[in-house]
Amino acid sequence: MTTKKSSNFATSYLKGYNLAQVFGWSYILYKFITNDFSSTSEAHLWQNIKWPVIIFQHAAALEIFHTVLGLVKSNPVLTTFQVLSRVIIVSGAFLATPNNYAVSSSGMPLAILAWSITEIIRYLFYFLNLNSVFPQLYCHMVAQRRKVLGSDASKKAQ
């Protein structure tokens, strides 16, 4: 009985975490889209989205604990590399470089746009998966992959 309660708590926690990340990255994407790009510097964009990016990119560090605690089935080492690579870009490049050098580059808006779109899709997928809503398009993609590769492709890999 205790494991079911803890399992329900873990599932509820993961639903909340994933939904919070969806809303957070959606807000960042909204701020990105509504930014005044007529400004001569990308540093203006960074000032508008600085704190949400810091909060939600660093909140992804919780994913390391999710894997270590067994809440999700993933490799803790790979998860650590993925999370730390993004945290290093935010903290080590965007925040630590003098005179807003990194945030004034054209790479910063590209990174923010790519992260926003990717994270919204990823966390929404996780949230829907926890709610037993498996996206039909994904099922179609898997079926097409099996059709092209053949059903015995997985047998050959073993």
Image (cartoon, rainbow, N blue to C red):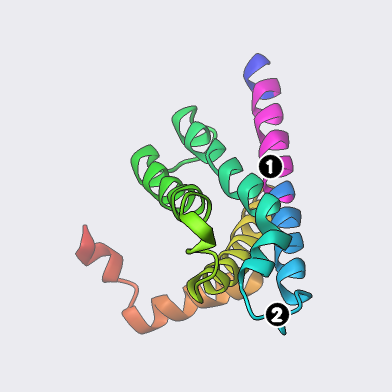
The quarter of the picture where residue 26 lies is: bottom right
The residue located at (48%, 73%) in the rendering is: 107
For the residue pair 11 and 43, the one nearer the viewer reads as 43
For the residue pair 37 and 28, the one nearer the viewer reads as 37
**Mark linked to residue 40:** none
For the residue pair 25 and 138, the one nearer the viewer reads as 25
Real-space Cα distance between discs 2 and 1?
35 Å
Residue 58 position in % (x across, y down): 57, 43
The quarter of the picture where residue 112 lies is: bottom right
Residue 13 position in % (x across, y down): 70, 34
* Residue 134 seen in render: no
Establish if 78 lies above or below 50. above
Label 2 or label 1, whichever comes before in sequence order:
1
User: For the residue labelled by badge 2, is the local secondary structure a helix, a strand or a loop?
Assistant: loop
The residue located at (42%, 45%) in the rendering is: 84
User: For the residue labelled by badge 1, is the local secondary structure a helix, a strand or a loop?
Assistant: helix
Q: Amino acid type of disc 2? A: Ser
Q: Which residue is mark 1?
A: 17
Residue 27 position in % (x across, y down): 76, 61
Q: Which residues are magenta?
A: 5-19
Q: Quadrant of the N terminus?
A: top right
- For the stretch drawn in magenta, the main secondary structure is helix
The residue located at (34%, 40%) in the rendering is: 77
Q: Residue furthest top?
A: 2
- Label 2 CA crowd tier, 10 Å (few <14, some 14–19, many 20+): few
Q: Which residue is mark 2?
A: 39
Q: Quadrant of the C terminus?
A: bottom left
* Residue 120 seen in render: yes
Q: Amino acid type of disc 1? A: Tyr
For discs 2 and 1, the disc positioned in front in the rendered view? 2
Pointers 2 and 1 in contact (C-beta within 8 Å): no
